[in-house]
Image (cartoon, rainbow, N blue to C red):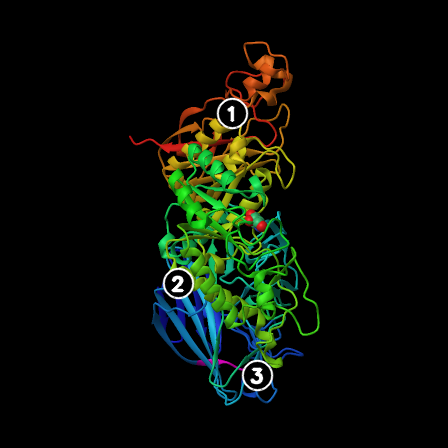
Amino acid sequence: MIRIKDRVFFLDSMDTTYGFMIDEQGHLEHLYYGAKLDETIDYNTLRFQSDFEYGSATSYSKETRGVMLNEKPLEVSSYGKGDYREPTIHLELPDGSRTVDLTYVRHSIAKSLSFQGLPQADKDETLVITLEDKTTNIELELFYTVLEASNMIVRNMRLYNRNDSPIILDKILSMNLDMPNNSYLLSKLDGAWIRERHIHDTPLLYGTVRFDSKKGVSSSNHNPFFVLKEPHTTDEFGRAYGAALIYSGNYETSVEINPHDMLRINMGINSFDFRYKVEAGRSFITPEVLLTYSNKGLNQLTQQFHQCINDHIVSKEFRYKERPIVINNWEATYFDFNEKKLLAIAKQAKRLGIELLCLDDGWFGNRDDDTSSLGDWTYNPKKIKHGLQSLASKINKIGLDFGLWVEPEMVSENSEMYRAHPSWVIRTPHHEPSQGRHQWMLDLTNPDVVEHLKSTLTTLFQSANITYVKWDMNRNISDVYSPHYKADEQGRFHHDYICGLYHVLDHLKTTFPTILFESCSSGGNRFDLGMLYYMPQTWTSDNTDAYERTTIQEGTSLLYPLSTISNHVSGNRSHQTFRHVPLESRFNVACFGILGYELDVTALTPFERRLITRQIEYYKEHRTLFQFGRFSRLHSLQDQNHTVWMVDNEDDAQVLYFQQLFRPNDRIDVIRVTGLESGKYRITNREQAMNIRHFGSLVNRALPIHLRVNSWLHNAIANRYLFPIETVDCTVDSIQLEEQGFILPHPFTGTDHGEHDMILEDFGSRLYRFEKIND
Ligand code: DGJ
């Protein structure tokens, strides 16, 4: 709800209030962001008053001595009138001056506002505040939307050049938030290829912490997202603010603490390598930021983001729509496949219960490795004899849907496309363009390239019964320049590249509303809310080692809902880490999100086939929960050695207990479970099995018969026999779960074990179901 009284604006969501006012000079002064305030609050008590000009300070004007913009919490900041913190806007006027002073003119409420060409949240009512600098003819609109149920504020802005000549934007971010500092820690998601989105906490000191992307994509180095939390905040308790940018290109975030302990947060398009000429009478619109607050810990913050993304960002067509279980041939075959192999994979996948085959890289041009053919989006008859339509219909006859991999933003040097359009490659007039994975990038600031992609991909997706597309992007941008722009326009390249991409994606989303697009960028190099607006899910990481995935998926879960996190069970050993993780654990981790398989299913042992069949049956039974349930990181057991997650819908929950290394003669673990509806719960564990091969010579203590280790008989039994794990079946009370917790079975303690002991090897795990019993 938006409450406006006199000069004061309060934005109320279900549990939060965001407040600001027009101050005596017309600037927008921030008042408050936190737990919900009632209407009787005296807004004056929220203000930081100062009317004394201290030594070396700059007062706003000679009439307002002591009013110092540098000391005011502001909703937007510009350069030149005494605010020396990081500005939201920095621009050059036609006369070369850079001072801008934006003050209130009017406000209005807009209905169902949408910004053409940018990804954004679905909105109902938006508060629009118009500011102006009358002397320099600059107008600025600030947009505020409240998404009440998810406790979210959406912010962005639009700048108009009302001059007769162009102005140059050097910096225009999406939001500025000033608040008093409270010893906050900055939590962010950092990483690299196959090590994406690890959570790191940094204390904030006086001065500025800045993180960004200059790679042309949001990148896996730092996600365009952060949390500010009080030092003792955990997943279950404490105060935290979160902000996430709905954008896929270069971005920046800065958090600054000034000497008077005022905190300033800025977020938006990266001002590095950005110089945007705005012609007379034209405007520039910035991407949206989602902003949220929780005083009930990080799980609450996470759940607010998840609800908002599921309700307002993901396209209506796929909102809460169950996603298929995919088999992807990449780690099974890499480039070495033909129709026979694909059909064999499809048949076996169908028997296991899988629902869709995604044909990955290598089906087009002459692509037998990664040195050629990107750009030539026609099938390779040596691999797919009768074409995509015929292959798709054979796959459909087997009983699977058909999906296809593409990497449309790229071109190989060795390709028909490059030979026909060498000028479409991003390059400067002076240098040989750098390569990444032997490939170059297409200049999506050029409308001809955009139109080519739209028509080529439309024809391709219409050419067969394709219901799923994996859109890859395997390098970052270099050699930034476009012949399409004049010399003084080159600074718009990065933003226009992303707008070009969004234009193509918008066209495809509208033309093929039922195709499920999965975004991918060497795994998670472009996992952001901008891409999720066009593509409802993202390939989380090329690292499918389940142990590594506990860290990657846990970091990802801070912002992104399970419905967007695509996970595959892959083979033994991990192609990324060479590690062996039990097949049951590979599933137990991958099922928290969108499940798929990526291994050669034609080469499975009977043991593996039976396990996978049972896994898929289990996932299908609980799919809605795993994809759309409420996700929590259970804090009580979080240590270096364990990962404990829960997904629930209040009266039905699945809890993952994942152990890193086995610790001999250790404690009995207890999992405290909070947030369930009160009442009694039946706890059972998913029926899992162990392979007796992993018992080594202990097999003879586990089985009633004697086996010679590694004998033919041992191996034959190991390939078929499902050694059952302990059974848990008990009834507990929700209070007991919250206060003391669920006590796990006694762990295996060396050599011997009791009937009910839990034998958990390194990287072992369990999946427990907590089901409410109705009285
Ligand atoms: C990178 C992706 O992340 C992989 O899953 C796979 O699709 C390869 N590209 C194919 O080149």
Residue closest to the far left: 775
Q: Which mark is residue 607?
A: 1
Q: Is 731 placed above or below 23 here?
A: above
Rendered location of residue 596, percent (x, y): 48, 41
Q: Is residue 702 one of those drawn in magenta? A: no
Calculate the distance from the C-alpha at mark 1 to the C-alpha at mark 2.
52 Å
Q: Which amino acid type corresponds to the residue marked 3 in the rendered image?
A: Arg
User: Closer to the camera, 232 or 497?
Assistant: 497
Query: Where in the figure is residue 56, as x and y percent of width and height?
Result: 67, 79
Which image quadrant for residue 227?
A: bottom right
Is residue 252 in sight in this rendering? no
Amino acid type assigned to the residue bearing label 1 in the image:
Phe
In the rendered image, which quarter is residue 142 located in? bottom left
Q: In this rendering, which labeled residue sits more in front, label 3 or label 1?
A: 1
Q: CA distance from mark 2 to mark 3?
A: 36 Å
Q: Which label sits on residue 146?
A: 2
Magenta segment range?
Answer: 98-104
